[in-house]
Image (cartoon, rainbow, N blue to C red):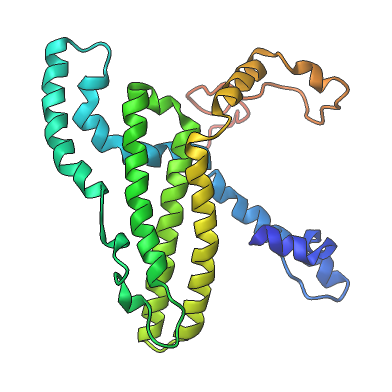
Amino acid sequence: MADELVQIRGGRGFETAESLAARGERAVPAEQILRDLRINRIFEGSTEIMHLLIAREAVDAHLKVAGDLIDPDKTLSDKAKAGARAGGFYARWLPKLVAGPGQLPRSYAEFHPPGHADLSGHLRYVERGARKLARSTFYAMSRWQGKMETKQGFLGRVVDIGAELFAMSAACVRAELLRTTEDHGREAYQLADVFCRQSRIRVEELFARLWTNTDDLDRKVVRGVLSGTYTWLEEGIIDPSGEGAWIAEAAPGPSKRDNVHRPIR
C-alpha cells in the first residue's frame, strides 16, 4: 500500500515531506513511509528465510513421524520401526483429508445473514483449500522424502497458500464481528467478499504452480549465476559502489576505530 501511495502521488510521492512543506503543500511523508516499512521484509530474517521457517513447521509433524523412514543412513530395522509408527499416524490423519464441512452446502450459514454479502462460500472454500494443501504437502513428502527441504520454491508456495487461506478466514470473522456489534457490518461484509474473491484467484494460481513451474530450470540458472557463467552480461555496467570487502570480518573485542578507553558509567 505504501508503494501504491507513492505511485498515486507521482513526483510528490517521491518528494520529501520537508520539500513539500517548503513549497507550501501538505507535508505527506510518503517516501519516508515506504523506506521505513521496507525493513519489515528484512528485519528478524528476510521474507524468503521466513518462508522456509514456516514451511519447516508445516512439515515438522511428518518429519517426526517418518524421519527415520526417509533417512538413507538408517538401518532396515530403524526404517521398519519408523514405518510402523508412520502407518499408525497416517491411518488416523489421512481420512480427515478426504471430506469436511467445506463440502456441505449449508456449512457456515451464520456468515450469510439477510441483506449482507455471502461469506459462507468463502469459508467453505478455505476449509476445502486447507485439506487440499495438506494433501499436496503429504504427496510432496512421499515424492521427494528427505530432499523436500531443498524444494524452496515449492515450500514458499505452500506457505503463501496457507497465508491466503488464513487471511480469508480472518477477514470473514472480522466482518462478522463488526456486524454483530453493529459497526459498519454491511460494508465490512462487502469488503471481505471482494478480498476473498481476489484471494481465491491467487490461491488457484499458487496451487497450479505447485506442480507446473520452472523450478528445475531456475536451479540450473542459479548454479550458472554462482559459477560466473553469465558475467558477460555485466560488461559495460558502471559499478556505483565504493571499494572494500562485501562483508567486513567480524572480530571480537572493541572497535579498532575507537582508541580511547571510556570509563563505564
Above or below: residue 158 compared with residue 107: above
Q: Residue drawn at (60%, 55%), measured in percent from left and top?
A: 37
Would residue 161 appear left or right of 106 to someone viewing this image?
Answer: right
Please give left or right for residue 144 compared with residue 237 in the image: left
Query: Residue 163: x, y in percent?
Result: 44, 52
Q: Which residue is drawn at 78% across and 75% down?
A: 26
Identify the image quadrant of residue 249.
Answer: top right
Q: Can residue 157 be seen in this view?
A: yes
Question: Is 162 in front, or is 243?
Answer: 162
Q: Which residue is drawn at 33% across and 24% down?
A: 145
Q: Quadrant of residue 136?
A: top left
**Is 108 above or below relative to 252?**
below
Q: In this view, does 238 lie to the left or right of 97?
A: right
Q: Where is residue 244 in the image (x, y as percent from the top left)?
A: 71, 22
The quarter of the displayed image where residue 67 is located? top left
Residue ID at (31%, 61%): 102
Position of 32 relative to 73 (above/below): below
In this orientation, which residue lies closer to the viewer: 52 or 82?
82
- Asked if residue 265 shows in the view, the reply is no
118 up-or-down from 91: above or below: below
Residue 75 rendering spot, x and y as whole percentages: 17, 10
The count of marks equals 0
Name the foreground residue: 190 vs 247.
190
Of the pair 180 and 17, the residue shown nearer to us: 180
The quarter of the image holding the N terminus is: bottom right
Q: Where does residue 219 sit, x and y in percent of width and height?
A: 57, 22
